[in-house]
């Protein structure tokens, strides 16, 4: 090749190299732009989730209500297909989500419990949970992802109302994050405003989340709807820790105090949740959760009677979006 030809070839290659460098710089700049994982809820929209929860409890009660025949080891598996219908959406003047009203219907529900000894109360609890199948509840999801104003729960399942509230909250349909948006690699902290299930005041769940990376939504679960499978999802890792933010002189919640009871004790634990959230819709596509908690609680009556509850709980949960139905065009 002559020197002139080589020089002309080099000059022709330079614009391509320059264009590639500019493209890389542009993509890198876009990757650093903060994103807001704002769920694009719309009235008339429907989402179908599969939730699978496995809980193992070891421990029991001692004292005045101690039952030597009660189960000390109980493993419960709960699977449900949950349909969520969006009833209404409230946004602020800037278009940001303030709250959304949802109707939840348990289209299918299966529960199985195993214990170290036969316990008739276990069968009763299973029957109570099965009563949810085909039933509908309504609740409000606020801008921080917290669940409020549940309607229809007390009539259907008054004995398990707290458990169902926690179940709906654990779905975390909205990943709370700084309003300015988040970037890959960024971490942030928050406190879960929902009360813990054990009646001890002063405890909160402290959450630390990290935006790990972007991946196809199907990487979280192979059952991702085809419309979302190849879309990019933000992968969020959230670590939770149950901590005592303050130590009140009397840790008895007001509800127990009104009934003439006093509570005392300690609790602790933590866990991890890995969530896949669609960058286009802001909707939760899948989440995997694992947690461990323990508590040692004493409940005392005005007459001086006491009962002690000690237990360890291990929970594994998987939440998967099975279908997304957009509202019909007007």
Image (spheres, rainbow, N blue to C red):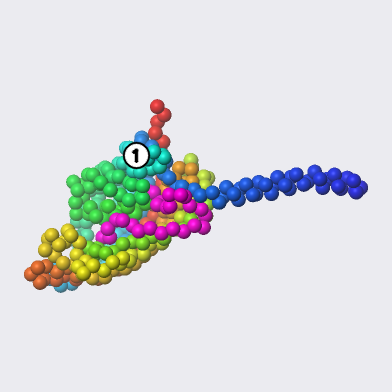
Relative height, residue 193 to residue 60 (above, below): above
Q: Count neighbours of disc 1 (C-alpha within 10 A) and say few if under 14, some if 14 to 19, many if 20 or more.
A: some
Q: Residue at x 36, y 47 (%)?
A: 143
Q: Main secondary structure of the magenta part?
A: loop
Relative height, residue 105 to residue 327 (above, below): below
User: For the magenta stretch, what is the residue range?
Assistant: 173-197
Quadrant, the C terminus: top left
Q: Is residue 217 visible?
A: no
Q: Residue at x 31, y 41 (%)?
A: 101
Relative height, residue 3 to residue 316 (above, below): above
The image position of residue 195, as x and y in percent, is 27, 58
- The residue closer to the viewer here, 323 or 241, is 241
**Which residue is at the far top?**
330
- Badge 1 is on which residue? 90
Residue 273 shown left or right of residue 194 in the figure? right
Quarter of the image where one finds residue 238: bottom left
């Amino acid at each position: 090749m002559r020197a002139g030809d080589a020089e002309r070839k080099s000059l022709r290659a330079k614009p391509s190299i320059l264009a590639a460098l500019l493209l890389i710089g542009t993509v890198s700049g876009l990757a650093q732009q903060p994103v807001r994982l704002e769920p694009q809820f719309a009235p008339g929209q429907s989402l179908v989730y599969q939730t699978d929860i496995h809980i193992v409890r070891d421990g029991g009660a001692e004292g005045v209500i101690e039952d030597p025949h009660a189960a000390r080891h109980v493993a419960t598996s709960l699977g449900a297909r949950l349909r969520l219908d969006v009833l209404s959406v409230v946004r602020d003047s800037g278009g940001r989500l303030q709250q959304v009203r949802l109707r939840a219907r348990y289209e299918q529900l299966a529960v199985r419990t195993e214990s170290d000894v036969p316990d008739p109360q276990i069968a009763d609890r299973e029957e109570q949970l099965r009563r949810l199948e085909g039933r509908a509840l309504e609740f409000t999801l606020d801008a921080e992802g917290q669940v409020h104003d549940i309607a229809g729960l007390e009539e259907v399942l008054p004995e398990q109302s707290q458990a169902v509230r926690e179940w709906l909250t654990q779905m975390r349909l909205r990943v709370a994050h700084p309003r300015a948006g988040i970037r890959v690699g960024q971490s942030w902290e928050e406190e879960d405003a929902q009360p813990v299930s054990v009646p001890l005041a002063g405890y909160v769940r402290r959450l630390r989340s990290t935006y790990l990376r972007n991946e196809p939504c199907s990487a979280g679960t192979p059952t991702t709807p085809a419309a979302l499978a190849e879309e990019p999802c933000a992968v969020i890792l959230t670590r939770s820790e149950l901590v005592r933010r303050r130590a009140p002189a009397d840790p008895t919640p007001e509800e127990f105090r009104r009934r003439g009871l006093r509570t005392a004790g300690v609790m602790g634990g933590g866990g991890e949740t890995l969530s896949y959230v669609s960058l286009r819709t802001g909707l939760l596509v899948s989440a995997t959760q694992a947690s461990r908690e323990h508590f040692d609680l004493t409940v005392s009556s005005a007459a001086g009677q006491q009962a002690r509850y000690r237990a360890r709980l291990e929970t594994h949960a998987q939440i998967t979006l099975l279908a997304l139905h957009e509202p019909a065009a007007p």
